[in-house]
Image (tube, rainbow, N blue to C red):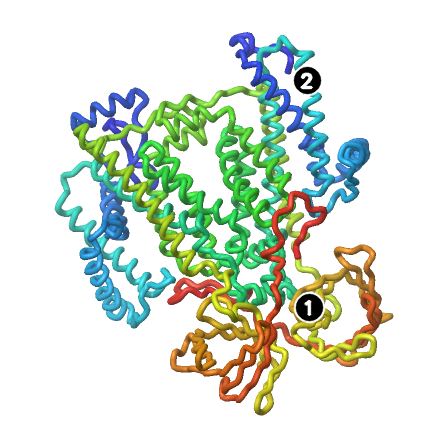
Amino acid sequence: MAEPSQQDSVRPAPQWHPATRLLFRFAFAYFLLCNLPFPLTWLFYIPHADVVLTPLLKPYWAFWRAAVPWVGKHLFAVNPAVRINGSGDSTWGYVQVFCWLTLALAATVAWTLLDRRRQSYVRLHEWLRVYVRFALAAAMVTYGAIKVIKSQFPDPALDRLLQPLGDASPMGLLWTFMGASQSYNVFSGAGEMLGGLLLTLRRTTLLGALVSIAVLGNIVMLNFSYDVPVKLYSAQLLVEALFLTLPDLRRLGDMFLLNRRVAPAADRPLFRRAGLHRGALALRTGLVVLFVVFSLADAYDSGRDAKQPQLYGIWNVDELTADGRVLPPSVADASRWRRMIFDFPGMMSIQTMDDSRHRYNLVLDPVQHTLALTSRDDPQWKSALSYRQPDPRSLTVAGKFGDRQIQARLHWVKAPKFLLTSRGFHWINEYPFNR
Amino acid sequence: MAEPARVEALADGVPGGGPGPETDPGDARDLASRGQRSPRWSPLTRLLFRFTFAYLVLYNVPFPLEYVPFAEKLVGPYGELWNKLVPWVGKRVFGVAITVQPNGSGDTTWNYVQVFCLLVIAAAVTIVWTLLDRKRASYPRLYDGLRVYIRFALAAAMIGYGAFKVIQSQFPASPFERLMQPFGDFSPMGILWAFMGASASYNVFAGLAEMIPGLLLTARRTALLGALLSIAVMSNVVMLNFSYDVPVKLYSCHLLAMGLFLIAADLRRLAGLFLFGRAVEPAAYRPLWRGTWFRHGALVLRTVLVLLCVGFYLNFSYDNRREYGDYASPGSPLHGIWNVEELTAAGKVPEGERWRRVIFGYPGSIGIQMSDDSRRRYALKIDPKAKTMTLTRRDDPKAKTVLAYTHPAPELLTLQGTFEKRQIGARLRRIEKPAFLLTSRGFHWINEYPFTH
């Protein structure tokens, strides 16, 4: 990068404004930090790649596992204990962003002091664009694949279909809304994959970045509006897409706002040697195709319907005894069970009389006839129940639940034909069917 | 466009193509004002243009008369004409009796038959026009005029829909009935409405995403950008309508098609910019008006009309929201969710048909939730003097139920009367300050875990 290229010798390196140089150094450091260890993490799908990748990445992961808690403890007096789960907006996530910003700032200062004579970073900028393009493309393709295959937003589960709207969290509502339509998932996923794939071609990078901005703008707004904890990550992806449009802002302005002649796109080949260029092209094409196939296959595997669990279905609670006292099915009693719902292996829901839904992790032992429940929110909470199934449609459950000794008698009911999942498509509606 | 030799039909047959590289805009303007020779279009392009012209004009008429004060004298009879023609065609051509006129649904049988009529009329116009106007080489000025018309028709729709969302009158927050309704009991359209209604900020975003393209369409220079953004937004709306059973499929498809029509002339320039990284010449344009005064006048008129349009829709949405949207405000002293503590009934009530809750949400309506979670909704009239409430079935205005009520304390209510041929008595207790996770969760910068409840 540092060596003068042929292009540089023909055309003198342009003079960048000092502020531009400063901003570039910061952007370079930050984008690198927040995307590392890309692309290594994305190579795991190559057979046996883990043999090389895992030892390579170990020190990197160890560094962050040590750094984030240390910074959290000493600078913010918080303990970012929770690291990786479905949430990207954990305390851990914010502290890590703080670390990236600080490190990028430090790198900018050091770099500025050491490299004062440099007029511009044309070639480095080009390489940074390649890196950001592919990091963003990988994210867009992955997110697109899990929508096209509909594994991100599965069909609403039984316990969800019985839950009243008001009892859902905003994020739960978004998930149910998305889960209700196959075609809308395919459309959303195709929009993301299209943006991602256009980014992998140099010529269509601008279009890919603009499509990505449109798609990600919507996603960022959904995440902020519906309490989806992917705010930091989606905002980062949006900023990356915006960054990729920067060199073409003048061309876009000439085209769409001023109706002036649009200059041709600058052509800055990465490699001067034709062989190198062709090799890179072939490598890119191979990796992109492999990656798309892998993403779709992976989404397909995780989206496949799990086996129906034991006790599958909806069980209405006919009688509930707590500490020897029968609780009447009063609609106002939030502690009286109304239904037990078994839909997926390893999970169980109890709907109480006020209709709110309570979810538990479940270990069902069909030999001992026990249900071991743990709370999804409170790791301390546990319950061990025994069950009997005198006939396929009857169930009794007994044991300590919370601080009460519970005995319940239930009967199996056929799941109703839910309007949400059975309405279907209609070309003609004489009236809006807004129920 | 201005240079005859360079103008050619694009693959999809829509007239277009950029000017040659040697043409600069000043040049184009001069040529235009001197009334240069028309470019030559292929016969197929001319045919397609005539059809497109006829269809798009027919579809959008009487726009913009519905916005013009005192013009309803013209709009009314025009609508009546369709109300006669459409049922006639439905009966004669398709053998269907059309009884329902367009209502909240734009995908009624009526609408489909109307689109059929429009297609037939446009085809007839095309044939006659082609026969009468065989010598014409092209229609550059008519094409420009059509583009202006479609630009403003699309802009008005985008601004209108945008305003409904920005003010949140299209998707109001869910009232009590909705909040108590199980997800499985929603229709797909219902879940889309509930989803949109749950976030004020997302409504503002979605509304601006429609209003901004609408406004960009009103200025000639930014019309291409406005059309592209309209296409992006309308594709999403069309997909939502098809996926969630929203009966605005026909109309939203037409708006999308209008957006596509508007970019047709610039496809070559767009490909140069986005696919080939080439230099792109500016779009040449022929001013619609020759005289400077005309041009200034048109500009002033347009600006005033656009501002009026924006103001009108925002104001309309605001009124609409105040009248229908604000369900959260207690309209009557009975507003709220009432648990049924005791229900007495003559005879045995079948499983699933006992009352669980009674909900007074929407003004003038009552909802009864049964023990199997099904809902019954009735129009409600309360007579506070006689202490009676009259429930009317929505699908059968003649089926009335009169219940006597007492309201001994703010949180207590009793109902008595004959409900569905059964003598019943119910004692209800109001839920004090019902709290819903959906409406109370709020915004959180930090989530240690996803909160997908």
Which numbered marker is on residue A351? 1
Q: Amino acid at mark 1?
A: Gln
Label 1, secondary structure: give it: strand
Question: What quarter of the picture does the N terminus of chain B occupy?
Answer: top left
The answer to whether residue B365 is above or below residue A8 is below
Report the residue at 33% width, 46% height from top: B156
- Residue type indicated by callout 2: Val
Subunit ID for the residue under disc 2: A
Image coordinates of residue B130 in percent, x first then y, are: 17, 46
Q: Position of residue A176 (x, y in %)?
A: 59, 58
Q: Position of residue A185 (x, y in %)?
A: 55, 52
Left or right? Give the position of B171 relative to B319: right
Chain of the residue on which disc 1 is drawn: A
Say whether residue B373 is visible.
no
Other residues around mark 2 within 10 Å, as few (<14) / some (14–19) / many (≥20): some
- Could you tell which of marks 2 and 1 lies nearer the N-terminus? 2
Q: As displayed, is residue B352 above or below residue B331?
A: below
Counting from the top left corner in percent of width and height, residue B67 is at 26, 50
Q: Residue at x 61, y 64 (%)?
A: B434
> Does residue A151 show up?
yes
Vertical placement of B58 versus A252: above or below? below
State the residue position of label 2. Answer: A109
